[in-house]
Amino acid sequence: MQFVEAFERLGYSVEAPRQDWSAANEHGVCISLWKKEMGVQDGLMWMDTRVHADPIENWADKPGNRKRIRHLRRAIDEFDGRVDVVIVSGEPGVSYGTAQPWLAEGGRAGTWWQVLDLDEESGHFEVILRHATAD
């Protein structure tokens, strides 16, 4: 699936496909994550730009970072940090490759992504996959 198509599958419109890394609508925020920049924490997928991403010098001043900071702030303020996610398979700074929307169905039922940390000055952030547990 193409990058823009993956966002659209989740109900979002990407304004500037060549520079945006996130999108928002009245119901939420969607961010893209690079598959190669993800790790595992407590058995669930996790991504922290301080640990997994290319050096910040490569992306801090990009328009996509500034927009993503605004979107992540909104997710924290309005949606308890919940975000929709598109996972891209390409190489950061080169190509998106393929993109897959994270759909909480089938084996992913009961999962959601949540922002744990955001540094609004730099754009560093951390997100983790959450899973509902039976009480």
Image (tube, helix red, strand yellow):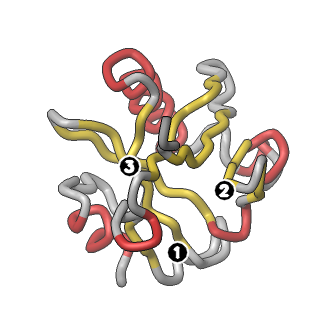
State the residue position of label 2: 45
Locate residue 134 relative to residue 57 in the image: left or right.
left
Name the residue at 62% across, 43% down: 128
State the residue position of label 3: 84
Tag 1: amino acid: Tyr
From the viewer's perspective, is the residue at label 3 or at label 1 nearer? 3
Q: Quadrant of residue 125?
A: top right
Mark 2–mark 3 Cα distance, whole angstroms, equals 14 Å
The residue carrying pointer 2 sits among few (fewer than 14), some (14 to 19) or many (20 or more) residues within 10 Å by Cα, namely: some
Quadrant of the rendering where the N terminus is positioned: bottom left
Locate residue 86 relative to residue 25 in the image: left or right.
right
**Secondary structure category for the residue under label 2:** strand
**Where residue 2 sits in the image (x, y, percent)?**
36, 80
Name the residue at 66% across, 75% down: 91
State the residue position of label 1: 96
**Secondary structure category for the residue under label 1:** loop
